[in-house]
Amino acid sequence: MTDETRILLVDDEPHVISALVRGLDEEPYLITGAHGGKEALGLMVQHRYKVVISDEKMPGMDGAEFLGAVKELYPETVRIMLTGHASVEATMRAVNSGEIYRFFTKPWDETELKLALRSAVEKYNLEEENRRLLRTVKRQSQELKYLEKSYPGITELRREADGAIRIDEDVTEEEIASIIAGCNDAERSS
Amino acid sequence: MSAETLHFVVGEEKKVRELLLDADVLPLLKGALAAGASCARVTGDDGEELWGACSPAGRGELLRSLPLMLEGEPVAHLELFGAPEMRERLEPLASLLIVALDTVLRNSLKRVLTTEIHTSVVNSSHEELVAMNAELARSEARYRELAENLELRVKERTAELRRAQAHLLQQEKMAAVGQLAAGVAHEINNPLGFITSNLHTLQKYVARFCAMLQFYREHLELEQPRERLVTEAETKWRELKLPHVMADVGDLMAQSLAGAERVSRIVADLKGFSHVDESGESVVDLNQELERTLTLLSHQLAGRAEIVKELQPLPEVKCQGQLPGQIFLNLIQNALTHAGASPRITLSSCFDGERIRISIADNGPGIPAALRGQIFDPFFTTLPVGSGTGMGLAVVWEAVLKLQGTVAVADAPGGGADFIITIPAGRN
C-alpha cells in the first residue's frame, strides 16, 4: 500500500489540466495529464493509476468511450467524469458504459473535487485490500484442502456435548502451545 | 312489383253506371222502341232510372221486368213498357236485351277489371319508381353532404397538419438552437472551469505572498543582523513554496486571461449570430454570417472536420438577421452528420452581378437523384428512426424562401452533396 497514488487527468484543453494540477498541488498525488483518450490509454499501459478524471467532449475518442475502455481494461481504476456540458444523453451514456464513480460539471468546485478524489483513492485502496485478503483466503483454503488430503480428519473439529473442543489425549500441553505459536507466526508472515 | 300494391277489384262494389256506357245501353233500348215497346228503361237496384228511352206516345204498362245480374246479384232491372198486345212480342225481346246487356256488362266488367289491374300495376310500379327516385334523391343528398363534409374535413385536417408542421419547424429551430446552446455552454464552461479553479489557486498564492511580506515587515522592524535575516527569509521562502508559486503565477494569470478572452469572444459570436439585438430587417454580409456560424460550431469542427473556404466579396443583403445563420447552421450540421468519419466541408461564395451564389459541399456519400425531390420535405430523413427529425433542410427551405432565393442540391466534384443557395442581390 506504500506505492504512490497516481492520478490521470484527461482533457483536450491543456489549461484545464494545468489548473487542476495547481488546485491539487497540496494533495499527495502524482498527477499526469493526457490530451486525449488514446494518449491516456497509452499511459495506463506503463503505470497503474488509481483514479482517472476525464472530460466528456474531446476530439477523436469522447469521454464515455474512453471511460468504457478503462472499465474493460483496468476495472479497478476509479473513474470520474468532468464535463463542460452535461447533456442527459451524454451523462447516461457515461454512467452506463463507463460505470463512473462521480460526475462533475465545469466550472467545478475545488473542495468537492478534492473530497471526491480522496474518497476515490480510499475506495481504490479498500478494494485493493479486499482483493489481497480474498487472495489470502483462497490460498489458505487451498492449503487446508491439501492438509486434509495428507492428514484426513485434521481440519475437522470434534466437540464435546458441552461445546468444549476435544483433543486426542496423546497431545501434551507443550505441543499445543507450540502449535498455537506456529499458527500465529504463519498469520503474521502472510 | 309487390302484391300489396295490387288492389284486386273482385269483391269491390262496382256500380252498373260504371260498367255500362250510354253507348252500350241506349241503342238496345232504342231498338226495343223500334220493335214496338213504348218505353224501355234500366233501373238501378234502388228503382231509380239509369237509362231510359220512351216514345212520345206515353209509357203504357210494364210488360216485362227482368233483373240484370252481376256476380249473382241483381244490380239493375230492365223494364219494357208498351201496349198489352205487344207483350208476346216484347217478352223474348226483353230476354234478348237482358242477354245482350248481360254480355255487355260481363265484358265491361272484364275490361274494367283488367284495366284496373293494369292501372294498379302501372300505378304501383310508378309509385315504386317514385319511391326509388325519392330514395335516390335522398342518398344523393347524403353523398353531397358527405362530400361537402369531407372537403371540409380535409380542409380542417390540412390546416391541422400545416399547424403541426409550422410547430415542428419552430421546434426544429429551437432544437438547433438547443444543440447550439449545448455546444456553446461547453465552450464557455471549459474556460470558466479553469478560470475559477485558477482564481482559487491564486487566492492561496496571494495568501502566501502576504505571509512573506508580513514576515519581511516584522523582521525588518526587529533590526537583526543581515545574515540572519537572509537565512530566516530563505527558510520562510521555501516553507511557503514560493519558488514554485513565483514560477507558476505568471502562467496562471496568462491562462486565465486567455480563458476570459475566449468566453467574451464566444458570447460576442453568439450575439452576432443570433442578431438578438436587431429588430426587423438588417443589412448583412453573408460571408460574415458564414464565418460566424463556423465559429459557433468550432467545438464540433475542431479536430474533426476539415473546412475549406473559397469566399469572394459579396454585396450586402437586407433581410431578417437570423435567417442566414439558420440556413448555414443547418446545412453545415447536415454535412457533418452525413460526411462520415473525416468530414471535409467546402464553403464557397460568389456574385455574378445579379445573384449571390453560396455553395456548401461535403465529401459524404452524396444524395441520390431519386431523393432530391424529397430532401427538403419536412420529416424526410435518411437517418435511422429517432436520430433525425428530418426538419433541418425544411428549415433551410423556409429560410431561403424568405430571402426570395432558391436552394438546390447537386453532385459535389468529390462525389458528395453540394447544396447551392442562390439569392438575388440588391433587395432594397
Image: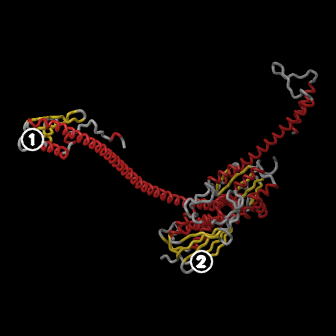
- Dot 1 lies on which element? loop
Using the image as rendered, state which of residue B130 and residue B98 is in the foreground: B98
- Which residue is identified by label 1? B38
Q: Amino acid at mark 2?
A: Cys
Question: Which label number is shown at residue B350?
Answer: 2
Using the image as rendered, state which of residue B27 and residue A46 is in the foreground: B27
Q: Residues within 10 Å of mark 1 (few under 14, many from 20)?
A: many
Using the image as rendered, state which of residue B212 and residue B23 is in the foreground: B23
Which residue is drawn at the image coordinates 62% and 76% (left, top)? B311
Q: Is residue A133 left or right of residue B162?
A: right
Q: Is residue A108 above or below residue B280?
A: above
Distance from Cα at disc 2 to Cα at disc 1: 130 Å
Q: Is residue B395 above or below residue A75?
A: below
Q: Is residue B190 left or right of residue A4?
A: left
Q: Quadrant of the N terminus of chain B?
A: top left
Q: Earlier in the sequence, mark 2 or mark 1?
A: 1
> What is the x, y in percent for residue B286?
56, 73
